[in-house]
Amino acid sequence: MFPFHRLEKLAVLDAFPEASARAKALRKDPELPADCKVKVIFAEDELGAETLLTEVREPRPRFDDDD
């Protein structure tokens, strides 16, 4: 995910552990552009995933003891 909601699909994986491991590896890659965010999303289809990724969500409330 790049600024201005420019999305680039990197992979389609069936299980969370596999998707999570792939995302973590990509985030550690020194070649990852500084303005890029790697996200894992589960949706029925590609359009649903794009919709979820570009939705504006309210930030979760934080508490003093949150880390």
Image: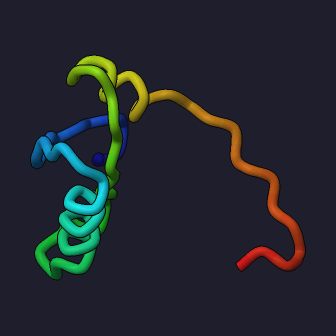
Q: Where does the image place residue 61, in percent across and percent down from the top left?
A: 81, 53
> Is 17 above or below relative to 57?
below
> Is 10 above or below relative to 6?
below
> Is 44 above or below relative to 58?
above
Q: Where does the image place residue 24, in percent across and percent down from the top left?
A: 28, 71
| Left or right of residue 34, residue 51 in this image | right
Say which residue appears at 29% left-offset and 47% top-offset: 2
Q: Where does the image place residue 63, in percent across and percent down from the top left?
A: 87, 67
How many marks the image carries: the answer is 0
Q: Where does the image place residue 42, in percent across and percent down from the top left?
A: 33, 37
Say which residue appears at 18% left-offset and 43% top-offset: 14
Depth check, front residue: 62 or 34: 62
According to the image, what is the colour scheme of the structure?
A: rainbow
Depth check, front residue: 5 or 10: 10
Say which residue appears at 71% left-offset and 79% top-offset: 67
Say which residue appears at 24% left-offset and 50% top-offset: 15
* Quarter-of-image position of residue 8: top left
| Left or right of residue 6, residue 59 in this image | right
* Quarter-of-image position of residue 57: top right
